[in-house]
Amino acid sequence: MTRKNLLLIPIFFALFVIGILFFYVVYAINTGTYLNREPVERYYFEYDIKVTGLSGKEVNGTTVIMVPIPASKEGKFFTPFTQKPDFIQKFLLKIMHKPERDHIGPYFRNMSETLDNKEIMGDWVTFIEETDKGYMLGFRTNETRLEDISYGNSFVADYFDIFDPINNGSPMLFPVENVSNISSVSYGDYTKYASNPKYDTYIYLSDNLKGGENVSFFVYLAANNDPYEWPEKYRGKYDNLLLAKVNDTGYVKVRTIMGQEVPWGNDSLEVMSTQYFLDFYADGTSNNS
């Protein structure tokens, strides 16, 4: 084999690899491989609210209920995930005449876009309010006969920390006051909670609900990290639960609890198995304050 022919081998191999990569990128763009992972396969959290004991109540005037909203301990909302294609992907998107909206990857809504000014069942309208206690999510109606509230949504964030969400700016049920002593243990290159942290937060009921039966609150947040960015050992979630039954009005201080599942399957700090959870359902009058 001549020297010239020997030089052609690495050139041919390089062109072959480049061709394979080119067609893979084309495939990825057209199938959404690099852009359209499921939301739960990113930094993802769910936020669910149930307020019961309202259905059938007859009231006068405007009724307002407010509950904790996902934010950091300091009251900062999360940053939604944004993904931009790299140089090669941008070039291919352009020559393939993909719409401009595809040049910036998937779009995920922020807190205001998702939660503010939404009409939900029961003729309630949502709003985000900056109160004396900090930001809260509210529900307002002018109906004279009330219905229970059931509402929830999910979010994709740019990043949050599941190992110490309280101290590292992760979404939790805000406002946050009087956090209990946090006990942590080493876990690989990180630490994780050794017990369930608790803290105080607030709910709000307007004065036209005074004197009625107990109103029950269930507010739950569960957040997992991005499984594509973390080895299996460090994949998991944390959750945050508020349970309360109250017959007061105005701002009512209530206790919340946090749990953690790191790695997946280690449910020793599962909030639904805590004494906090069991006591609430054992005591029909508890307000967990």
Image (tube, grey):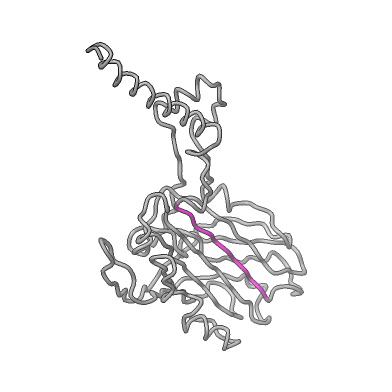
Q: Main secondary structure of the magenta part?
A: strand
Above or below residue 201? Residue 117 is: above
**In the image shown, does 161 or 121 lie closer to the viewer?**
161
Q: Is residue 130 rendered to the left or right of residue 118?
A: left
On screen, residue 124 versus residue 229, left or right, reads right
Image-based side of 261 in relation to 62, left or right: left
Q: Is residue 198 magenta?
A: no
Q: Nearer the viewer, residue 166 or 251?
A: 166
Q: What's drawn in magenta, residue-wise?
A: 43-52
- Tell me the quarter of the picture where residue 7 sits: top left
Q: Nearer the viewer, residue 202 or 249?
A: 202
Image quarter of residue 13: top left
In percent of width and height, residue 280 lies at 54, 83
Image height check: is 96 above or below 131? above
Residue at 55%, 60% in the rendered image: 137
Q: Is residue 129 above or below residue 285?
A: above
Q: Residue furthest left?
A: 3
Picture quarter with the N terminus: top left
Q: How many marks?
A: 0
Give the residue drawn at x 38%, y 61%: 162
Q: What x and y, as percent, mark residue 191?
A: 29, 66
Q: Position of residue 157 (x, y in %)?
A: 45, 50
Near-viewer residue (134 or 258): 258
Q: Position of residue 12 (x, y in %)?
A: 34, 19
Check if residue 44 falls in the magenta segment: yes
- Residue drawn 50% across the image and 25% down it: 93
Q: Is residue 237 placed above or below 288 in the rendered structure?
A: above
